[in-house]
Amino acid sequence: MNKTGYLYDIRYMLHDAGPYHPEMAERLSAIHKGIKDGGLLEKVTVIPASRADLKWIKTVHKEAYIRRFEEVCLSGNSHFDDHDNGICTETYETAFLAVGGILDTIDRIMEGELNNAFCAVRPPGHHAEADRAMGFCYFNNVAVAARYLQQRWQIKKVAIIDFDVHHGNGTQHIFETDPSVFYYSIHQHPSFAYPGTGRDFETGKSEGTGFTKNSLVLPGQGDGEYQMLIQADMIPAIKKFDPQFLLISTGFDAHGEDEMSDTRVTTACFSWIMETIMGLAKQHTQGRIVSVLEGGYFIPRLPELARNHLSILLNG
Ligand SMILES: [Zn+2]
């Protein structure tokens, strides 16, 4: 059994994106309930939120953007940058708590207290660009985590695997010229889905060419296509890159019952994806994985999806 961390804090519910917004606090309650009812709380190390130092946020985001985010939140505005990005006065601090909790989790892994962890944070991050909020995301949590691993812990090569059904445009753009961070995403074809980026010919730029890989899934496709693409694209790419640490953008919105996508992934296939990732971590990163919550909006399925996810980190 692994020493597994579980970052969870009720303060992650303080961010309120507004009435009828799909990225709601109830997502976290559902995730936590699944983990608690599954008897996993006693087996993992529960990690509370902590506030990130601004200097780490600045490794990814422009200072002017961070200031603007703070001002817009504190001014009582209900949206930031796009209509999608509902905010409240607590959103700015909650975003700091999300990043800070993840960085604390990384410290615990690098210090040997833990092998891996699942970070159930809000707000999510993979759509956030260096200077723009997008798709319910304000700070790019995994991107800051990758920079932190490199600058605080001298980890040279970090791989980010993103299986949220939407392309992580922010993460791709932040690292597209950087050969030290490999970004792999499997998502619904950009023509049919938000945000419209992540074509298969987007493979990185200048020195980063070859260090971005996108696998595209069409509406109506599900387990078979996911398994085929992960075997054909993800596994060889990660093996070739040989990362020292794996960060996962974990989204459950490719699930067949999730209305945010037209893909038909089953609960069993989400487990298969995570078991596959665990196998790669065993071979390449000494088992070091930090999984960070992105999307997943069908509340009735989130308990089982989160319970299986954490249980694979624990037992895989
Ligand atoms: Zn998503």
Image (spheres, rainbow, N blue to C red):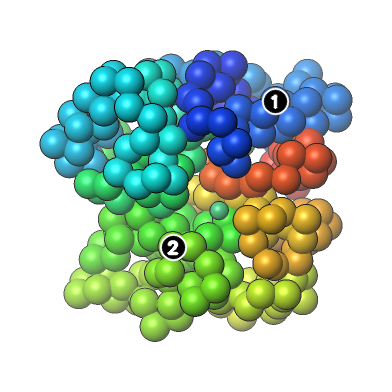
Q: Residue 302 at what x, y percent from top left?
A: 75, 40
Q: CA distance from mark 2 to mark 1?
A: 27 Å
Mark 2 surroundings: few (<14), some (14-19) or many (≥20) residues within 10 A: some
Q: Secondary structure at mark 1?
A: helix
Viewer-proximal residue, 297 or 38? 297
Task: Report whether 295 appears left or right of 71.
Answer: right
Q: Quadrant of residue 175?
A: bottom left
Q: Residue at x 29, y 65 (%)?
A: 176
Residue 229 quadrant: bottom right
Q: Is residue 115 left or right of residue 40?
A: left
Residue 34, picture quadrant: top right
Vertical position of residue 186 compared to residue 67: above or below: below
The answer to whether residue 90 shows anywhere in this view is yes
Give the number of the disc on residue 297. Answer: none
The residue shown at (61%, 75%) is: 217
Q: Residue furthest left?
A: 64
Q: Is residue 201 left or right of residue 281?
A: left
Asked whether mark 2 and ligand 1 are closer than 8 Å, the reply comes as no
Residue at 35% in and 55% down: 170
- Determine which residue is flagged by label 2: 195
Q: Return the residue at label 1.
A: 29
Q: Earlier in the sequence, mark 2 or mark 1?
A: 1
- Counting from the top left corner in percent of width and height, residue 265 is at 75, 63
The location of residue 208, given as percent across then percent down, is 27, 70
| Residue at horizontal 60 percent and vertical 23 percent from the top | 8
- Tell me residue 227's x, y (percent): 72, 72
The kind of residue on which mark 2 rests is Pro
Q: Is residue 53 visible?
A: no
Residue at the extreme bottom of the image, as rendered: 201
Depth check: give the residue in front, 298 or 222.
298
Quick check: 61 above or below 16? below
Amino acid at pointer 1: Ser
